[in-house]
Amino acid sequence: MKLMSIATSVLSELLQALPHLRPQIYFKASLTALSHAMEDQVLAATLEQPLVIASFQRERFYRQEAHRYQRLAQRSNQIYVLSAPETDFTNSSEYYEKIAFEPDDGLSQEWHLVVIAQNYATCLVCRESMGSLAKNQQLRDISPNLDMDTARRFEGIWTAERGVSRKAAELLLGRILVYRPELVDKIYQARLRFGIGENISETKVDQSNEYACDIDTDPFVQRLVTYLQASQYKLHKAYRSIAAQARKERLVNTISTAIRRSLDPHEILQVATQELGQNLEASRCLIYRAQETDAKAVIEHEFLSSGVLSLLGKTWPLEKNLLFREVVLQSQGIYLSDTHTDVRITSSKELGELVKKYGIRSWLMEPVFFQGRLLGIVELHYCNETLHDWQAGDFDLVEAIATQVGAALIQAEAYANLEDLNKQLEALDRTRSNLIAITGHELRTPLSTIQVCLESLASEPDMPLELQQVMLSTALSDSERMRKLIQDFLTLSNLESGRVEWHPESLTLQECVDLSLSRIRTRFASEKLPKIVTQIPKNLPLIKADGDWLVEVLAKLVDNACKFTPTDGQITIKGERNRNKMVEVTVADTGRGIEPHLLEIVFDRFYQEEGALRRTTGGTGLGLAICRQIVNGWGGEIWAKSNGKNQGSQFHFTIPMIDGTPQQKPSKVKSKKSLSSSE
């Protein structure tokens, strides 16, 4: 029968035996770096026949490290690897001792690595946070393909204190004997050699200094430095991505400015051709007018790099151009990475002659459409012998420019429709301004914080562990805030620019409220929330709205109320029919309230009451602005009421209702993942 102690935690037993220890919080990435550094110290061959005990929780984690432990086994015959089997992990003595513990063993929630030698000792003993396990499971239930491994959190001990390491080894060796009693002699030799266990003589162990270490620890330090450098590289990539995005935004802005400034299609196309060709470093960029039935086009607008043959003023064949026909047929762009091997070129005499005459090696064609009507073609030619290496987002950029060119051509042809086109340009301008605001202020602050934290960790190798954890936690917190901010900004931009497709259906308000509260409770699973009360009449008429977006509005309003309401307060969700044949929903709280002169501007993007208040409550400053856009999208209204500071607040919004159809059955709202990162 399995011993009762097997179900207990090794970490708990260690802390009980050594009450002076104080556990710390570690993320999965930190434990990986520490483990690899400890293993590299052994692989550096500076330790003589050390004792190494490792526990991997699950076999899938062990499989990633199996090759390292085969190498470790060449340094010592006292290597023990434990794991809960999932497929073929079994007890064996090949290379090293493998111990398959049962899945319900307490080891399945822990992470262990102990290294003990005559002149060195260190151990890592951690248990996965129960909150981390619950949260990750909830996220996997919502999105099974989501990889939450890097977000796992552990609580435990990492130390070089010899007494702690020996006690950890004693506990783990005891667990090993439960599953592999035939190893008793081998384990006895390890205990005897390193003084492990109360009944073993301590005479062979140097007790003069519990932290004595006379080995070269460079392998351990170098591994940690490598990990920090990798983190800095990721930060550098983030800066490069933002810079590339800013460059593309400047390109869009330049072309947009030309469109707003002029009704001359020649001027617009010339600006677009020059800017696009220069920014994407093309050998040749062409933008020409063409319709589906055209047999040829005259090249009037061209960007050309030095040493490349010009097409300006020449006739460009379309009738027998297989690429043009494919673009027209598929209504989307195509890209040829190598014209020398592409079958569409090698099988066409006409295209083969064009490629040879004009030296085209890589070729992109993007159609210019407006409302399904072909207006022209954007072409990019790369004429050197080296194949062009496209960067992420370049194709989207060309497509975006083609879209802008199409709008400009229609604007020039039909001045009567100028007002509608100007609305599209204003939406693009707002997107540009908001993105500049984010990159210039909202993103710069957390990025600066992350950089300072990582630079401090990289430049101060002797920094206390507690301060290291503060630095890592701060960097992770700010990176999460950036992710939420960007996702909310993209959601708001799509709503403001009209790119959202609405799918109205008949719904019950109660179901939407229930789904939004489920989302809120999932997000705040580890926190205490104010009391939430719903007052939705059973005879309330069905409403007509997009269910996903309605749940989003409710969740954001309740989320906002939770942030500004103490845990002993109350949040009330009401629904009632008003005089305008609309259903009016109210989300009221007993929180900090709003000053009367601020009731309207709270719906503005990036609004922050009392300076840093928004920062302390973890918001992005876009939630209420998103709510206003959604409610306006289905033809409703949204407003706020409050009697002042510390008097609570009420947020009201209206939804069209379906009246006079009692026999109509409501649609079922599908519970999808959040439309923005704030959920």
Image: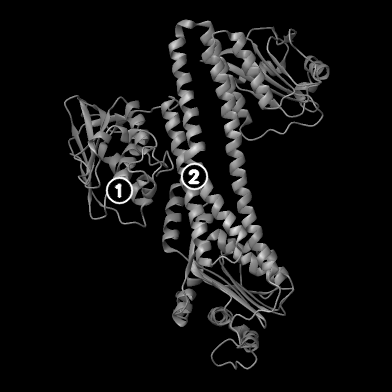
| Residue 285 at x, y percent in the picture | 70, 19
> Residue 177, located in which quarter of the rendered image?
bottom right
Residue 484: percent from left, percent from top:
45, 43
Q: Is residue 652 left or right of residue 162?
A: left
- Which residue lies under the disc numbered 2? 445
Q: Secondary structure at mark 2?
A: helix
Label 1 vs 2, first from the N-terminus: 2
Which labelled disc corresponds to residue 390?
Answer: none
Q: Is residue 221 above or below residue 271?
A: below
Q: Is residue 505 above or below residue 472?
A: above
Residue 152: in sight, yes or no? no
Relative horizontal placement of residue 595, taking residue 450 as reference (left or right): left
Q: Nearer the viewer, mark 1 or mark 2?
A: 2
- Considering only vertical position in the picture, is 59 above or below 371? below
Dot 2 amino acid type: Thr
Secondary structure beneath disc 1?
helix
Disc number at residue 562? 1
Distance of label 1 from label 2 (alpha carbons): 25 Å
Of 569 and 586, the residue lying toward us: 569
Give residue 336's quadrant in the image: top right
**Viewer-proximal residue, 253 or 666?**
253
- Reply above or below: 213 against 607: below
The residue located at (59%, 47%) in the rendering is 235
Residue 299 x %, y %: 70, 10
Q: Is residue 530 left or right of residue 85?
A: left
- Is residue 435 at all visible to an observer of this figure? yes
The picture places residue 575, in percent across and down from the top left corner, at: 21, 37
Which class describes the residues within 10 Å of circle 1: few (<14), some (14-19), or many (20+)? Answer: many
Which amino acid type is shown beneath numbered disc 1? Cys
Is 419 on the left or on the right of 380, as rendered?
Answer: left
